[in-house]
Amino acid sequence: MKKYILTGGASSGKSSIITALELRGEHVINESAESVARYNNAMGLKNQHGTPQFQQDTLKLFLQREDRVLKLNPKRVFYDRGIHDILDYSIKYGASGFLNELINRSTNHEYLKVFSIDRLSNFDKTEYRKEESAEETNKMGEQHIKTYENFGLKVICVPDIGLEKRVDFVLKHCEDRKHEDDFRTIL
């Protein structure tokens, strides 16, 4: 099974690309943090991103979603953020209680390619779930690239070229076998 990650800062268009891929019949795993944030908001819990519990809930939901999709044994699956993203945000927010678990899981996750989605030119930080400014979002996007590379993964940057062209770009690079020797399984 081939696993592909879409990463990047907030409001880069990852979720739109994931939805477009799903509409084209691909298996996807949606971002967990966004769902946990919506759940917390519905429960009256505001601004929970910086808490260890939020990061733990994000990891738990990520693993549940991954387990459900992988049981289907699809040919390939696209992730809206990977476990490495959860690691970055846990470090950012000081949720250190389970960093060793995240590092171990990051080391053992087998991703074929990582796509870093460039921030949209029409970035709008007023969207309710986006807590980061354009500067912060760029910083986190750069941090995600560094983290994936530090774990030995090649990162392919996806420019802001419109949704359908971005989806085509990702799919074209998934079919390109030229970089598959970069795939690493670290046990």
Image: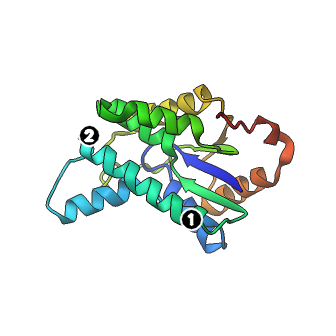
Residue 133 relative to residue 82: left or right: left
Residue at the outermost front position: 187
Q: Residue furthest left?
A: 44
Say which mark, if any, is on residue 43: none
Element at label 2: helix
Looking at the image, is 54 positioned above or below residue 89? below
Between 23 and 58, the residue placed more toward the observer is 58
The kind of residue on which mark 2 rests is Pro
Image vertical order of residue 55 relative to residue 18, above or below: above
Under mark 1, the amino acid is Val
Q: Position of residue 127 (x, y in %)?
A: 32, 56
Above or below, 89 relative to 66: above
Viewer-proximal residue among 79 and 130: 79
CB under 8 Å between discs 1 and 2: no
Looking at the picture, the colour scheme in use is rainbow
Q: Secondary structure at mark 1?
A: helix
Crowding at label 2, few (<14), some or many (≥20) Cα neighbours within 10 Å?
Answer: some
Residue carrying label 1: 69
Position of 144 relative to 111 (above/below):
above
Q: Quadrant of the C terminus?
A: top right
Q: Position of residue 89 (x, y in %)?
A: 38, 37
Q: Could you tell which of marks 1 and 2 lies nearer the N-terminus? A: 2
Image coords of residue 168 (percent x, y): 72, 59
Q: Residue at point 34% right, 39% down?
A: 133
Q: Is residue 141 visible?
A: yes
The residue labelled by disc 2 is 52
Q: Residues within 10 Å of mark 1 (few under 14, many from 20)?
A: some
